[in-house]
Amino acid sequence: MSEQFWWYIARSGGIVALVLSGASVIWGLLLSSKVMPGIPKPRWILDLHKWFGGSAVVFTIIHVVALMLDSYIGFGILDVLIPGVADWNPGAVAWGVVSGWLLLAVQATSMLMNQLPKRLWKGVHLTSYGVLFAGILHGAQAGTDAGNPLYILGVGGMALVTIFLTTYRILTARRLQPALSS
């Protein structure tokens, strides 16, 4: 086995976790906005959104465990759980730690959605933007693939689609609000 095995697992796990987080945010925005009016939304579409988010948790765990098993930097448990503790590139690692904790909060409250006040669930769910953009910053500052043109194109495209759909949703909600209140 190559001495870089865990490093390759950590890199790929992190990239897959970021892509799945982005897919979950984008899919959630497609579901909640009026981008697809009149198109029936069967149950499997919501299930896919949930699958993206749950899979992002799994690949984040793979990323973190592989980093701890890789001997090059030597991350310890506190380095991956507490923002700013890591000796290696503490700011960049902190973005990843924050993204991971937010992801867990979003997933946990989503699993408990029916038992929580809707306002609390929605407030925590909105931190999905933080998951995605903290993950993007983490990858840009700590990721060894950050300079790869494919990575830049993929992450940039994901960010642009998220910003576009968020803007569309906000503008659509404002246009519909006066009509609803009359």
Image: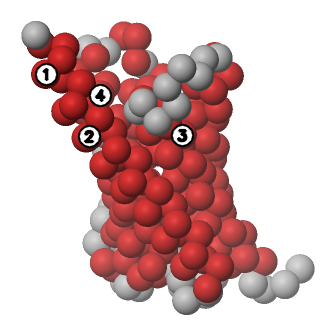
| Placement of 127 over or under 181, stated as above or below | below
Q: Residue at x 57, y 31 (%)?
A: 50
Give how far apart the Cα atoms at labels 4 and 3 are. 16 Å
Label 2 is placed on what type of residue? Ile
Give how far apart the Cα atoms at labels 2 and 1 are. 13 Å
Give how far apart the Cα atoms at labels 2 and 4 are. 15 Å
Give how far apart the Cα atoms at labels 2 and 3 are. 16 Å
Label 3 is placed on what type of residue? Trp
Total labels drawn: 4
Nearer to me, 7 or 16? 16
Secondary structure category for the residue under label 3: helix
Label 1 is placed on what type of residue? Pro
Rendered location of residue 152, percent (x, y): 55, 79
Quarter of the image holding residue 99?
A: bottom left
Secondary structure category for the residue under label 1: helix
Q: Earlier in the sequence, mark 2 or mark 3?
A: 3
Give how far apart the Cα atoms at labels 3 and 1 are. 27 Å
Which mark is in front, 3 or 1? Answer: 1
Q: Residue at x 57, y 48 (%)?
A: 23
Q: Residue at x 33, y 39 (%)?
A: 169
Q: Please indicate whether residue 172 sits to the left or right of residue 71 in the image.
A: left
Q: Earlier in the sequence, mark 3 or mark 1?
A: 3
Q: Please indicate whether residue 19 sits to the left or right of residue 125 in the image.
A: right
**Label disc, if present, on residue 122 of the rendered structure:** 4
Which mark is in front, 4 or 3? Answer: 3
Q: Earlier in the sequence, mark 4 or mark 1?
A: 4
Q: Earlier in the sequence, mark 2 or mark 4?
A: 4
Name the residue that disc number 3 marks. 27
Task: Give the residue furthest to the right.
Answer: 1
Name the residue that disc number 2 marks. 170
Mark 4 is surrounded, within 10 Å at the Cα level, by few (under 14), some (14 to 19) or many (20 or more) other residues, namely some
Q: Please indicate whether residue 146 sits to the left or right of residue 92 in the image.
A: right
